[in-house]
């Protein structure tokens, strides 16, 4: 859970080579990387810039006389900063640098760069490299810094699957300007399943513990109840169980789309890139945020023991919440999706609704009302309505500011909170839709029934959570919202008997969970005592600090 120093070798270094190095280059590098004869990382972010890639300062200047690129770190803010595995473990990196050829700045490009000697592992001349120090979590990973002092690499170390620099300095452009961002899009495509998995771990711990913990009464005079029988506890945990499933289903779809994209790009078809970029930008932002919230609620649902490291939930939280920042800070990525939504609105206004992609076609279709009692399809129409409403409102605000003479960037900034709201609603619609479709495809009728309950819980929880939008224009009435509330409470109670099976079905072992509270055998109290006794402070009855500090203080006459 604390991460692995070689994680980025598998998660980004190898995928960057696969997607961006030419077949010829990969004959040299890929097998060596796969066999772990060389260890690599993905070095893009700098001390001064992470989000705004166009302002990366590390330069790779082509020297036509030697057919080499000269990598250089012009100032302190240009140091690479953050890459996982860079500090101590890697001897190679895919480095993203601003490429300069014949004095022309050609923007960020990826290069394979050797950092350390393959035998001694010592850093090479011209390279400054090290670890950036402890973090909130992920402390088994050596996130690092890296500087170059006019460090030379061969021309052929520019990753040349999609763009090239010929020996004479002729630049051959890629088929899409952002094709070099593919390693990021890949990780974002995998993040919904990854985060769903973190959420599932925290929920497994909290739900199991909630059936061991007895406290208070529901009906007086009876045995104290398992805390999972409280409606508030169910409300805290069960909607997140539904989300963990929903995120996983959505993630399967984005992973499939990324694989499709990779194949299509190789045939020169880049049409999926904009759609997948928009989709994964929104999804990574919503999923990471809701996962962090869900894990924190799971911790609180374990009361005092949730705060102990014996629960292990704090570690899961620390790792998961990193996802709100890495692979694109969440607000920044929501605004990327918003660009796509605004463009879609502009297309509709221009009478080109027919050109809209399937995920945004609903923006052009108005619905007057819904009959929620007819079932999940009607909820989908309600989600479409609130997303459409907010997308149009935010877009109109932006377009009006533009028309009033504001500069594009200023108008955008003044509309940005509303735009991020639109992006979230659009993404939540997508999550609900993929959840619905995935449940419909389940063949086993008993499994389908339980998952359908979770789906119902999800759509009622989500609609209630977005109620202000739906009430704003009178789309939903307050009596409809009462119906949604009743349904929500109905499904909380209905799911209760299946709650433990739902989390057990994720099949985390005790070794994976590392939680005293979430043990499979439920022997929480004995093991909490054993865990406490094993605390380093309990190795001796009297600590050296007693002689050193306590006694002088207690014996002092002052
Ligand atoms: C087995 C599989 C494993 C997979 C791993 C899964 C992991 C999940 C769980 C993990 C569990 C444990 C594992 C531990 C591992 C942890 C990994 C953490 C690693 C972290 C790595 C990093 O963080 S790497 C650095 C990431 N950095 C960023 O994400 C930077 C964010 N910034 C950007 O991406 C860009 O700068 C930004 C997109 C914001 C803007 O780009 P810019 O060039 O400035 O472009 P604009 O001017 O804004 O836009 C111009 C047009 O280009 C379009 N566009 C932008 N990007 C793309 C793209 N990628 N694809 C397509 N199109 C793009 C943009 O939309 C604009 O279009 P328009 O038409 O003009 O509107
Ligand atoms: C655990 C972890 C692992 C990482 N691993 C790697 C790695 O392996 N390789 C690598 O290269 N990098 C890595 N990173 C770096 C990471 O990708 C960046 O930190 C991330 O992309 C955010 O960029 P930033 O730090 O520049 O944030 P900033 O952009 O400085 O964000 C600060 C604030 O400014 C806001 N902001 C910035 N730009 C805008 C805008 N245009 N509009 C509105 N608001 C804006 C943000 O929303 C945020 O609130 C890692 C980071 C972490 C935490």
Image (cartoon, grey):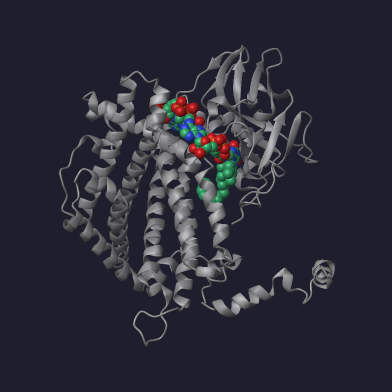
Q: Nearer the viewer, residue 284 or 332?
A: 332
Q: Residue at x 44, y 41 (%)?
A: 259
Is the residue 126 above or below the residue 552 in the image?
Answer: above
Q: Residue at x 65, y 18 (%)?
A: 61
Q: Looking at the rendering, in which quadrant would you find the C terminus?
A: bottom right
Percent x, y for residue 413?
A: 42, 29
Q: Is residue 11 visible?
A: no
Percent x, y for residue 526?
A: 59, 80
Q: Nearer the viewer, residue 349 or 107?
A: 349
Q: Residue at x 44, y 75 (%)?
A: 211
Q: Is residue 119 visible?
A: yes
- Looking at the image, residue 448 sits to the left or right of residue 138; the answer is left
Image quadrant assignment for residue 343? top left
Percent x, y for residue 161?
A: 53, 27
Q: Looking at the rendering, in which quadrant would you find the N terminus?
A: bottom right
Q: Nearer the viewer, residue 66 or 320?
A: 320
């Amino acid at each position: 859970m604390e991460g692995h120093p070689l994680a980025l070798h598998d998660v980004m270094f190898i995928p960057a080579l696969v997607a961006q190095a030419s077949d010829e280059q990969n004959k040299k590098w890929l097998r060596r990387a796969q066999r772990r004869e060389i260890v690599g990382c993905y070095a893009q972010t700098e001390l001064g810039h992470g989000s705004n890639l166009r302002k990366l300062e590390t330069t790779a200047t082509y020297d036509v006389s030697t057919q080499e690129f000269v990598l250089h770190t012009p100032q302190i803010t240009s140091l690479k900063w953050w890459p996982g595995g860079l500090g101590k473990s890697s001897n190679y990196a895919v480095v993203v640098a601003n490429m300069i050829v014949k004095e022309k700045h050609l923007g960020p490009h990826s290069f394979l760069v050797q950092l350390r000697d393959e035998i001694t592992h010592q850093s090479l001349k011209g390279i400054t490299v090290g670890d950036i120090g402890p973090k909130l979590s992920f402390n088994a990973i050596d996130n690092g810094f890296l500087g170059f002092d006019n460090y030379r690499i061969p021309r052929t170390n520019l990753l040349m699957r999609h763009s090239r620099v010929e020996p004479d300095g002729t630049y051959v452009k890629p088929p899409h300007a952002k094709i070099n961002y593919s390693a990021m899009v890949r990780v974002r495509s995998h993040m919904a399943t990854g985060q769903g998995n973190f959420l599932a771990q925290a929920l497994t711990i909290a739900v199991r513990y909630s059936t061991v913990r007895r406290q208070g009464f529901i009906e007086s005079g009876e045995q104290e109840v398992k805390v999972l029988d409280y409606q508030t506890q169910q409300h805290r945990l069960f909607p997140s169980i539904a989300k963990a499933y929903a995120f996983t289903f959505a993630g399967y779809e984005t992973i499939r789309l990324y694989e499709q994209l990779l194949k299509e790009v190789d045939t020169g078809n880049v049409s999926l890139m904009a759609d997948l970029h928009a989709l994964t930008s929104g999804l990574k932002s919503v999923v990471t945020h809701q996962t962090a919230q869900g894990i924190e609620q799971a911790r609180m649902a374990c009361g005092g023991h949730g705060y102990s490291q014996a629960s292990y939930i704090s570690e899961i939280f620390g790792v998961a919440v990193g996802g709100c920042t890495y692979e694109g800070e969440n607000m920044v990525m929501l605004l990327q999706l918003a660009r796509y939504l605004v463009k879609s609105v502009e297309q509709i206004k221009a009478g080109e609704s027919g050109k809209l992609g399937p995920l945004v076609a609903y923006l052009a279709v108005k619905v007057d009302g819904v009959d929620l009692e007819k079932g999940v399809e009607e909820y989908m129409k309600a989600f479409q309505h609130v997303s459409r409403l907010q997308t149009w409102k935010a877009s109109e605000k932006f377009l009006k500011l533009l028309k009033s003479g504001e500069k594009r960037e200023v108008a955008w900034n003044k509309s940005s909170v509303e735009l991020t709201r639109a992006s979230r609603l659009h993404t939540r619609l997508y999550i609900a839709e993929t959840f619905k479709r995935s449940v419909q495809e389940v063949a086993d009728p008993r499994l389908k029934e339980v998952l359908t309950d979770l789906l119902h819980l999800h759509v009622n929880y989500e609609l209630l959570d977005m109620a202000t939008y739906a009430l704003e224009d009178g789309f939903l009435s307050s009596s409809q919202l009462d119906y949604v509330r009743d349904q929500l409470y109905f499904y909380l109670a209905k799911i209760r008997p299946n709650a433990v099976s739902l989390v057990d079905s994720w099949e985390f072992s005790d070794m994976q969970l590392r939680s005293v509270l979430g043990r499979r055998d439920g022997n929480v109290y004995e093991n909490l005592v054993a865990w406490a006794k094993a605390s380093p402070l309990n190795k001796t009855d009297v600590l050296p600090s007693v002689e050193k500090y306590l006694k002088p203080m207690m014996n002092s006459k002052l």
